[in-house]
Image (cartoon, grey):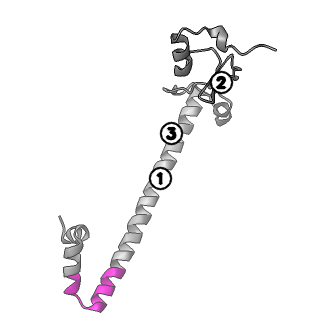
Amino acid sequence: MSALQELARSRTKAKAAAKKLDVAALKKLIESLTIALQAEEKRLKDKAEREKQNKIKKINQLLAESGLSVADLQKAPAGRGRRKTRTRRRVTKRRKVPPKYRLVVAGVEHLWSGRGRAPRVFADHFAAGNSRESVEIPKD
């Protein structure tokens, strides 16, 4: 590993090395490193652009060999793609069922539609020997 790489990896070592230089030399070093950084960034950008152009050439060659055009690809039907692993269930709103039974206990009115498990108040009422007809709401 070069000395420059070592300085780049360790902030402490870079500070120690910078203390050994005077301000003018440190500024010149920073300027040189900035120029080197810009050159390296330009080189990498150019390399990426060349790779992109090579890929475009390959794709155009494949299209020419197969007899297709870009327009053919644009009007081609979309594939099925990946299937979703989780699907959402459609939640339907259920209409409210009007109460069929009414029971007043200690001044509190309890209503029940008659569907599902009976509420505890109604279950206790029926367990005491009362009938469902005794708490049924009369139909108008």
Label 2, residues with CA under 10 Å away: few <14, some 14-19, many ≥20: few
The image quadrant where one finds the N terminus is bottom left
Nearest to N terminus: mark 3 or mark 1: 1
* Range drawn in magenta: 17-31
For mark 3, what is the residue? 58
For mark 2, what is the residue? 92
- Residue 36 x/y as whole percent: 36, 72
Give the answer, above or below, for where 124 lies relative to 55: above
How far is disc 2 from disc 1 in space, using C-alphas? 56 Å
To which quarter of the image does residue 61 belong?
A: top right
Residue in the picture at 69% in, 23% down: 96
Q: What element carries label 3?
A: helix
Residue in the picture at 54% in, 27% down: 81
Q: Is mark 1 on a helix, strand or loop?
A: helix
Q: Magenta span has 54?
A: no
Left or right, 42 with respect to 101, comes to left
- Residue kind at label 3, given as amino acid type: Lys
How far is disc 3 from disc 2 in space, using C-alphas? 52 Å
- Residue 12 x/y as whole percent: 20, 75
Q: Is mark 2 on a helix, strand or loop?
A: loop
Left or right, 46 with respect to 137, comes to left
For mark 1, what is the residue? 50
- Which of the pair 63/40 is nearer the observer? 40
The image quadrant where one finds the C terminus is top right
Q: Magenta span has 30?
A: yes
- Which of the pair 15/127 is nearer the observer? 127
- Which of the pair 2/108 is nearer the observer? 108
